[in-house]
Amino acid sequence: MVVTFNPRESLFLNMRLLSAETNRIILIDNGSTGQSMDVIELAQTIPQLELIRLPENQGLATALNMGIKAAIQQGFEWIATFDQDSAVTPNYFKGLLRAFESCPNTELVASISPRYMDEVSGTVTSFATRCHADTYCFVKASRTSGTLYRASIFGKVGFFRDDFFIDCIDVEYFLRCRAAGFYALEAPHVRLVHNLGQTASHRLWFLDRTVTVTHHSCLRRYYMTRNRITVYRRYVSFDPLWVWNDLLGTLKQMVKIVLFEDLVLCKLLATFQGLIDGILGKAGPKHRAGKSNRACT
């Protein structure tokens, strides 16, 4: 299941790669406009693909939930979620399920994620906390894109949070599943080629190292901060170590924004507004944050 919003031409190739690994693709288009509709039309020529169009951008979480519910209604036992800029590698699902089958407590496994290879730098990111015989690893949280979810888990812990709109949807769901007693796995030999946005690398000569920045927009910085504060407030008592480590990572991102990104003042102000709104418990799309939203299980 794939969510799109004004996708690039690479979407068609990504869908071709995905169609070679599965017999069903549900594509939820989140209100794309303009020339990107030509890309959507081209993707629709793939026989395995079912297109569901939304009239406007209702947020990543809502689109994901819509696709998941459609897949559940069609009787699928496993549901994979993908971003439009993600490309699977050969034997992708076989690799994920191999990791699942290697785990002795399969009845408690909620999800299996790959390791992520950055499309630009080739850097591979793993979220593993501990691994077993190089066949499967446990993770505290991972990314939504590329993750394979057991369909029954949504009936037990609920769906993604619609009121988050876009960012931190993944980490909140992983924490929620773990808080309910389920495991999240990572398949160490499976790769998903992933694009995190306008990434760029910068050399820190005084530290003899290279850092990567994402150049996310001011609006994304707002959502990232607001939703993270919401996650911290809810799960700090469940996993304080994860919250602490994630907070440190977020602070490092802020330093990189100041040193290397453009629109620094805009992004800092958006981050501050997200911090305040997160503390106040506001949610939903930014233009109507704080208004009544559907409760999350």
Image (cartoon, helix red, strand yellow):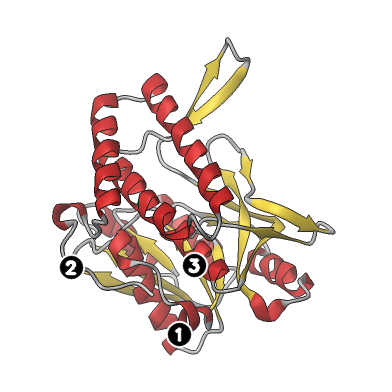
Task: State whether residue 118 is above or below residue 23.
Answer: above
Residue depicted at x 74% and y 54%: 130
Outermost residue, front side: 237
Find the distance from the CA under tag 1 to the CA under tag 3.
20 Å
Q: Amino acid at mark 3?
A: Arg
What kind of element bears circle 1? helix
Q: Is residue 92 left or right of residue 64?
A: right
Residue 18, x across and y down, in percent: 54, 65
Q: Tell me which numbered mark, 1 or 2, is placed earlier along the sequence.
A: 1
Q: Which residue is mark 1?
A: 72
What kind of element bears circle 2? loop
Task: State whether residue 147 is above or below residue 258.
Answer: below
- The answer to which of 45 and 92 lies nearer the viewer is 92
Outermost residue, right side: 133
Q: Is residue 132 left or right of residue 68?
A: right
Q: Which residue is mark 3?
A: 176
Q: Is residue 265 visible?
A: yes
Q: Tell me which numbered mark, 1 or 3, is placed earlier along the sequence.
A: 1
Q: Amino acid at mark 2?
A: Ser
Residue depicted at x 45% and y 44%: 196
Q: Is residue 131 left or right of residue 287?
A: right
Circles 1 and 2 in contact, beta carbons < 8 Å:
no
Q: Tell me which numbered mark, 3 or 2, is placed earlier along the sequence.
A: 3
Residue 26, x across and y down, in percent: 42, 74
Circles 1 and 3 in contact, beta carbons < 8 Å:
no
Residue depicted at x 43% and y 52%: 232
Categorize mark 2 by other alpha carbons within 10 Å: few (<14), some (14-19), many (20+): few
Residue 292 bears which disc, if any? 2
